[in-house]
Amino acid sequence: MKRVTFAKIRSEEAGPMIRELMVKGFVDIHAKIGKDEGYRYVPILPEHLDEEPVSSLELVEGDAHTLDRRPPQERIRAILGDELADMVPDRWETVGDVVILRLSQECWSRREEIGRAYAEVLGAKSVCADVRGVSGEFRQPSMEVLYGTDTESVRLENGIRYRFDVTKVMFASGNTDERMRMRKLDCMGETVVDMFAGIGYFTLPLAKFSGARRVFACEKNPESYEFLIRNVKDNGLSGIVIPILGDNRDIPGRSFADRILMGYVQTTSEFLPTALRMLKPNGIIHYHDTFYVNERDERVKKIFDEACGEDGYEVLSIREVKSFAPSVSHYVADVRVRPSRPTRSR
């Protein structure tokens, strides 16, 4: 067993002293902080034994009990001490080497210390706090950086590399099943339009695995668009995906798309006339929206009745993507639009 040097600190003084040692980077994070009646024993890295405040503390030799086999939650709590142990979250989201937390108000004054602890235990280059979720037309996240400076990362998922900055662009981890479904679609030889491409959430798996001939990926947010371009290149899809910066309602042309992705929610119906203008006869629309769980079929019918006429479409399936709010879910309806639909355009 590895022998290390511990700083012996009275329990009543341990909280602020351990925090100071952690901030300075003096603590050996691979060894357990021990305790007995009245004292805490903090493992110190050997290169810092002669530095203040370590040199002014009582030092003792002992065996290091490794933390490597302990759950990360337990290691984080051990670093932060009893005062914070019951308040810090046991769950987090990892995006490559960036960690995202949700902190309670009680933790906020100690956020930098908490961020450092999570970074050291989880091996993250940066730790961010999700403050208010996403908002606005571009669904932008509200993040505060707790530790580190580099918030750009890469998420590897089902053979796709998604590069993005967690402070600038949302990544809906709850949409994993739908992204996987896009990968499994049979779109051999099709022309597809993704009206709300973002960084390529649905565009990339569809373009790489479904057999689509061409995918027009439209995105209005310039920051998301820049990552879309990079992700198309990184995934080797430059010959298939055509990124478009701007409002999808400005895409020219009629009846050229075999399939259209409408991966937006809440105001999706406002863009349906544009989708219908671009869609070929017998084309398919993957229509995303949020509905009360007991109203989904009725709402989908009403939306497409108004846009296509009662006999102008066929609902192939309606799937729940994820829960959105109490009694409300995010759904996707796969709808085939018949050639006999009324011609309605904006």
Image (tube, rainbow, N blue to C red):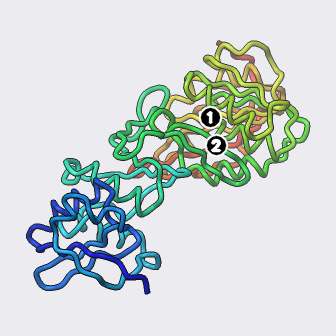
Quadrant placement of the C terminus = top right
133 relative to 3, above or below: above
The residue at which mark 2 appears reads as 162
Pinpoint residue 328: horizontal percent, then vertical percent: 44, 48
User: Residue 23 sits in which quadrant?
Assistant: bottom left
Look at 67% across and 24% down and name the residue there.
Answer: 218
Which disc is residue 199 wearing? 1
Pinpoint residue 102: horizontal percent, then vertical percent: 34, 51
The answer to which of 292 and 275 lies nearer the viewer is 275
Tell me: 165 left or right of 19.
Answer: right
The answer to which of 9 and 308 lies nearer the viewer is 9
Q: Are marks 1 and 2 in contact (CB under 8 Å)?
A: yes
Look at 22% across and 53% down and name the residue there.
Answer: 107
Q: Is residue 101 visible?
A: yes
At numbered mark 2, what does the secondary structure look like: helix, strand or loop?
strand
Amino acid type assigned to the residue bearing label 2 in the image: Tyr
Look at 33% across and 61% down and name the residue there.
Answer: 89
Crowding around mark 1 (Cα neighbors within 10 Å: few <14, some 14 to 19, many 20+) is many
7 relative to 110, above or below: below
